[in-house]
Structure formats: C-alpha cells, structure tokens
C-alpha cells in the first residue's frame, strides 16, 4: 500500500502499489505532490508494476500529475500498466499526452491460460439483451422510492 | 430462481474495495476468468465511487447493492443510492463530463459501459440513482453450484 520513491538526479520515480481507487488515490496524490514539490524533478515516472487494480481514479491520478509536471516545467511517464489498466487508460486520451512505457518486453497476459476455454468451448451464448420482464420483477427492493423513479436512459443494449 | 445477495454499507470511501471485493467473491462461484472478474470489479468500483463522491457529496448515506447470478451465467448488479440524483443523465454519461473537479476524469460511466454488456441508469433529483449492469460470462463446463 502507498507509494515508495526513488530519486536519481532529476528523475523521481513513484512506485505505486496495491489497488488504485478513489479512496487510495487521494493518499497517493498527496504523497506524490509533496515529494515532487520538494524534489522538483525534470522527469516524474509513475510506476504501476506493483498495482493490482485500477479504476478511473487512476486516470485522474495520471492526469493530475501530468498537470503538476507541466507546472514544474518537467515531464511525466507512466510505467508498466497491466492489460486491465491499459483498457481503462485507453478510454481516455491520456496516452496521447503521457508516454506509456514497459520496463519488460510484453509477456503473454496472465489471464491467457484461464481464458483459453472461452475459445475452445462452443459458443452457445446468444448476446441477447436483458429481458424487459426482469425489470418489472421486483426482486431488488431495498427501498420504497424505486417506483417513483421516472427518468430512464438506456445505452448499448 | 436466481441466486441473489444483498449488501448495504455506509458511503465511506474506505468501503470501496470492500464493496467490489464482496461482489467478486459472490460471483466467484461461477468460476469466471480473471479478466471477467476484473472487468466486473472495475465497473462496480465506478458505480460505488459515484455514490460516495457525487450522490452523498457532503454527507454519509447508505449504498445498496443487489447482485444476482443465473444458471446461464448472467450476472446482474444493481447499485443504488438515496443521494442527490442526476439532473441530466444523458449529459452525465458523456465521456469526460464531470462535476467532480480536477482529480476526476469523467470516465466512470464509460468504464461501466465498456466493461459490462449493458448499463442502465435511473435517477431522480433529490431521491437518488440506480445503476443496473448486466454481464454474461463465457461458457464453462462446470460452474453453477446447486
Ligand atoms: N450516483 C450519482 N449521484 C449523483 N450524481 C452522479 C452519480 N453518478 C454520476 N453522477 C454524475 O455524473 C457525472 C459523471 O460520472 P462519471 O462516473 O462518468 O465521472 P466522474 O465520477 O465525474 O469521474 P470519474 O468516474 O472518472 O472519476 C459525475 O461527475 C456526477 O455529476
Ligand atoms: Mg465516477
């Protein structure tokens, strides 16, 4: 958990670890900003090799550090995003602003052994959208206000 | 009959990992791939974080999750808050739209959309928001424990 730092000349590396969600990201942000504010590096690297999970809070973390390094007249690189994290990051335009680097040559993704059966088992799965009657069946009701909801938007169903 | 679980918890940000891990642990009995599980955790994390960050911006309220799995490996996760509600859902769902300030990317809904098979949003200002996500797991020879 948290952040470890390696400072070599003008290059600060922040080694992030654990899960990056909104909760964890706020602590990481403070640590990185404090350290970078003191060291004023020319280059900041965010090292994701020890990170096990990331949601869109990770994009916010990268974007915010990009702006920080711009303010410090330095630059930012991002190191070793996993496949899952790359898929999150690729939803944003961050890759156009910040180099996404890998310290090791890309290996076969860890999940590949597990996901193989996906291809070998005959696809009996029809991609039908959820049935409308699922909606009216009230198996969920935590509270009474549900029935009062009016606005509804559906996407990519 | 679907197999269902319910969870409710206070909107402290320290509960974000608890919430997604609990949904993942429930769904694990379907023996999903690592990637499927991580997709689901990511989508749940987005929806839960939105309850904490936006719905209950200046307060602590309850977040309600219902998850169900069916024999045909379909997962439904419903995440609900009784917070401020969303005035314009279509606008809120646009990529990069955010009312959350500098550190928010405005990509939570985009993540939910791309990491699940379907996403539905219902909301009413002053009453709250409900997110319903479906994900169909790929076929496995064994899986549903009776
Ligand atoms: N449960 C909710 N209650 C009230 N408003 C919400 C809720 N969920 C989303 N919103 C509104 O929709 C906007 C977009 O949400 P989205 O998750 O896509 O982006 P974000 O939360 O602002 O940023 P990110 O998720 O990338 O950190 C939010 O900024 C907020 O205004
Ligand atoms: Mg969000």
Image (spheres, rainbow, N blue to C red):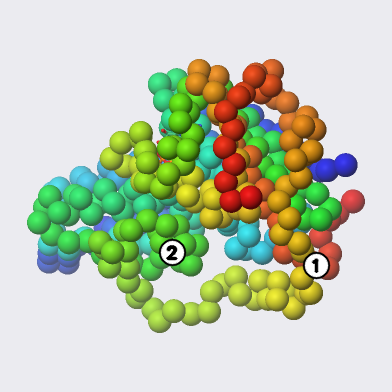
| Mark identifier at residue B73 | none
Residue at left offset 73%, top offset 74%: A117
Label 2 sits on residue: A86
| Local secondary structure at mark 1 | loop
Q: CA distance from mark 1 to mark 2?
A: 29 Å
Image coordinates of residue B140 in percent, x first then y, are 79, 66
Kindly tell me whether mark 2's CB lies below 8 Å from ligand 1: no
Q: Measured along the vertical axis of the image, is residue A143 above or below residue B144? A: above
Disc 1 crowd rating (10 Å Cα; few below 14, some 14-19, many 20+) is: few
Disc 2 crowd rating (10 Å Cα; few below 14, some 14-19, many 20+) is: some
Residue at left offset 53%, top offset 37%: B48
Picture quarter containing residue B65?
Answer: top right
In-front residue for pair A33/B72: B72
Image coordinates of residue A5 in percent, x first then y, are 26, 58
Kindly tell me whether mark 1's CB lies below 8 Å from ligand 1: no
Marks 1 and 2, the one that precedes in the sequence = 2
> In the displayed structure, does residue B49 sit left or right of residue A10?
right
Label 1 sits on residue: A124
Query: Quick check: marks 1 and 2 in contact, CB under 8 Å?
Result: no
Residue at left offset 63%, top offset 50%: A157
Chain of residue at mark 2: A
> In the displayed structure, does residue A78 sit left or right of residue A122?
left
The reply to whether residue B107 is visible in this rendering is yes
Residue at left offset 54%, top offset 50%: B113
In-front residue for pair A68/A2: A68
Image coordinates of residue A139 in percent, x first then y, are 78, 32
Q: Measured along the vertical axis of the image, is residue B2 above or below residue B85? A: below
């Amino acid at each position: 958990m948290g952040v470890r730092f390696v400072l070599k000349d003008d290059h600060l590396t922040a080694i992030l670890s654990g899960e990056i969600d909104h909760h964890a990201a706020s602590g990481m942000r403070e640590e990185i900003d404090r350290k970078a504010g003191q060291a004023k590096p020319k280059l900041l690297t965010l090292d994701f090799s020890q990170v096990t999970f990331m949601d869109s809070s990770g994009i916010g973390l990268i974007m915010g550090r990009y702006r920080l390094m711009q303010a410090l007249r330095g630059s930012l690189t991002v190191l070793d995003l996993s496949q899952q994290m790359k898929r999150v990051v690729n939803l944003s335009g961050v890759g156009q602003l910040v180099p996404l680097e890998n310290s090791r040559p890309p290996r076969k993704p860890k999940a590949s052994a597990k996901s193989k059966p996906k291809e070998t088992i005959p696809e009996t799965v029809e991609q039908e959208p959820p049935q409308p009657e699922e909606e009216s069946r009230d198996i969920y009701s935590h509270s009474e206000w549900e029935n009062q909801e009016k606005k509804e938007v559906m996407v990519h169903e | 009959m679907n197999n269902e679980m319910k969870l409710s918890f206070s909107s402290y940000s320290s509960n974000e990992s608890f919430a997604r891990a609990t949904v993942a642990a429930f769904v694990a009995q379907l023996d999903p791939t690592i990637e499927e599980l991580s997709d689901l955790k990511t989508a749940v994390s987005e929806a839960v974080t939105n309850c904490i960050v936006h719905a209950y911006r200046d307060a602590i309220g309850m977040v309600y999750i219902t998850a169900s799995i069916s024999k045909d490996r379909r997962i439904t996760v419903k995440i609900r808050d009784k917070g401020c509600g969303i005035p314009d859902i279509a606008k809120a769902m646009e990529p990069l739209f955010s009312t959350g300030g500098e550190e928010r990317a405005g990509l939570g809904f985009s993540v939910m959309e791309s990491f699940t098979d379907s996403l539905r949003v219902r909301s009413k200002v002053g009453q709250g928001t409900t997110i319903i996500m479906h994900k169909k797991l790929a076929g496995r020879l064994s899986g549903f424990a009776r």
